[in-house]
Amino acid sequence: MSERLLLAKFGHEDDLLASCKELRRHDYKIVDAFTPYAVHGLDRAMGLEPSRLTWVCFLCGMIGAIGMLIFEYWVGAISWPVDVGGKPWNSLPSNVPVAFETAVLLAGFGSVFALFGVSRLYPGKAVRPEFDRVTDDRFILVLAETDARFDPAEVKHLLRPFNLLELEERVVSAGGVPS
Amino acid sequence: MANTMTQRVPTSSSVPNPDALATLRPPLIAGDKQPADVTHDICAPFERGPTALWWVAFAVSFTTLVIGAIAVTYQIATGIGTWGLNRTVGWAFDITNFVFWVGIGHAGTLISAVLFLFRQKWRTSVNRSAEAMTLFAVMCAGLFPIIHMGRPWLAFWMMPYPNTRGPLWVNFKSPLLWDVFAISTYLLISAVFWYVGLVPDLATIRDRSPAGWRRRLASIFSLGWNGSARTWHRYETVYMLLAGLATPLVFSVHTIVSMDFATAVIPGWHTTIFPPYFVAGAIFSGLAMVLTLMLIARKVMQLEDYITLRHVEAMCKLMLSMGCIVGLAYGTEFFVAAYSGNPYEQFVFLNRAGGPFRWAYWTMVTCNVIIPQLLWLRGVRRNIALVFAISIVVNIGMWFERFVIIVTSLHRDFLPSSWADYSPTIIEVATLLGSFGLFFSCFLLFCRFIPVIAMAEVKGVLKSPHHAHEHESVKGDAA
């Protein structure tokens, strides 16, 4: 199965944002957008849900903190209790700093690796789809030509006020969404 | 291409009533740049061959690094009896250098994480190199405790791992062990933060480099980045999370470093003011180092349009405020000693200001408190040569601060019969020089191979006032 995609290219983020809103108003399905930098407000314009990676971060941090507290308790009070200056073996305050550091470490690495996993980023991955100058100064909006009603001419007409640079059709095989 | 940009017709989406103040503020990036200009300007220095000046700087740094490496090899082979330490002054040069370098790193995280959370947009021009500075400074810092062990090949004993000695675990109640965890977490999180910020720029390098080793390396490390808005959306979330994690982390690191001292019962160390005092001092010294490096980089790599006087001024103001906090801490220490009624505490502080190390103490006060007051003057903050000189002075002053805290508190302890003097040996000085060599060698290599300015972030703040977006004026453009 193959899917037809329409690529609209712009030279400025304002044009991308405005056309994104305009197209969504006309019920067009926006597959994705490709930009050289994080365009603020594009997530809302595209209707993207807030990322759930914050939960990964929270979970990893909790595992780090609680795991380390338990480990420190086990080391200091059970496995080999050592009397240091008469301090209690299971002293909670003295266990907090290391538990905090471990929480930060796991939360940080957890969220970054989750980002790489969810976004399928890995070393040596081929760039798909490839667009000219998208990491430089081009802004590209990708539309799915989902049904027979889809009319590229109308899209062109809709986007004309937004300094559209180029409109290109691509046929993507199997899977559809460029990844 | 820049022409098509300037001829662009503003669309109906442009905010009808743009932020009136935005037009009054000078733009963050001078020279009316377009995104393509940013790519070109930032990539140009490392796409050209290295300049003669770079080679000279690298040769000097690398030679210093080699001198340091020889000194370290000698002291490890012979033993740390090659240092000027004695039974009274058991910590001196080495730990001074450790605290100095950890402190340097803190400004990098302040700029990359704390200012990110406060939406200070000017950070985008300096955050990449400030983070690199953090990384290299923490690397240098980590070397000193490892050298201090005398048997650095046993450094892994600091980690809790099952072993055949019991297993005998590390002591989780000791601040020295907290330090191990704090510094290594700090190094790892800083590295990850730096790398995550680098991925989109590596993709830019990949896409503009001709086939060759640069393109191959960039495509491996850019992880197939394609600029998808969905990825950017998650990326922004993770970047925010990392900034949120790095902020308490950076405060915890120097807090824990200060506890190495504050939990000891040495008068002059045993004070509750240490954590905030150390954190402010760390950021102060780090900002001075950022300024030193930035002012050189902007000149040598022709980045005057990106690191403008506005950036320099902002950093000067931050440095001044940190310097005032540090000055307040110096005063508070004396007040608390006088007010405590503890004769040992009072003696230590009188000895600091009037004893055999008074030259170090007054160097510290002059460099950290008196000279930075010049930064109140706008004319001084906008004078690059003066700012550069002040940044060097603060670097020196902050090194002396750590020396003063460590050595003057130790050298005259409770028993006058055990009072001792301390002076560093040539080996210790060579080790300090070597750490500067390592730091500058790493930084110069970074300037050669990696974009020193975060292109993807700078492009995002290029917008001139008439492009300002509604939601940004609502939030209040703090920059």
Image (tube, coloured by chain):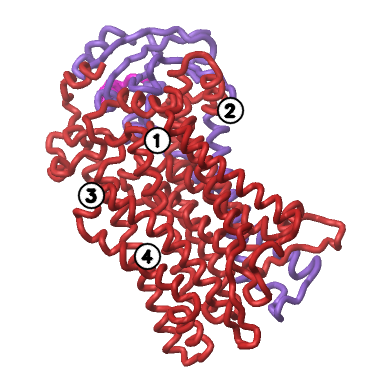
Q: CA distance from mark 1 to mark 4?
A: 31 Å
Q: Which residues are magenta?
A: A18-29
Name the residue that disc number 1 marks: B454
Is B213 located above or below residue B148 in the figure? above
Q: Residue at x 25, y 40 (%)?
A: B28
Front residue (pair A51, B156): B156
How packed is label 1: few (under 14 Cα within 10 Å), some, or many (20 or more)? many
Q: Chain of mark 3?
A: B
Looking at the image, residue B43 sits to the left or right of residue B82; the answer is left
Looking at the image, residue B388 sits to the left or right of residue B268; the answer is left
Figure colour of chain B: red
Is B371 located above or below residue A114 in the figure? below
Badge 3 and badge 4 in a common chain: yes
Badge 1 and badge 4 in a common chain: yes
Front residue (pair B393, B28): B393
Name the residue that disc number 4 marks: B368
Percent of width and height locating residue A23: 29, 21
Magenta highlight: main SS: helix
* Amino acid type at mark 1: Ala
Badge 2 and badge 3 in a common chain: no
Q: Which chain is purple?
A: A
Q: CA distance from mark 3 to mark 4?
A: 20 Å
Q: Chain of mark 4?
A: B
Quarter location, residue A152 = top left
- Marks 2/4 in contact by CB < 8 Å: the verdict is no
Q: CA distance from mark 2 to mark 3?
A: 45 Å
Closer to the N terminus: mark 1 or mark 3? 3
Is B462 located above or below residue B176 in the figure? above
Magenta-span inclusion, residue A26: yes
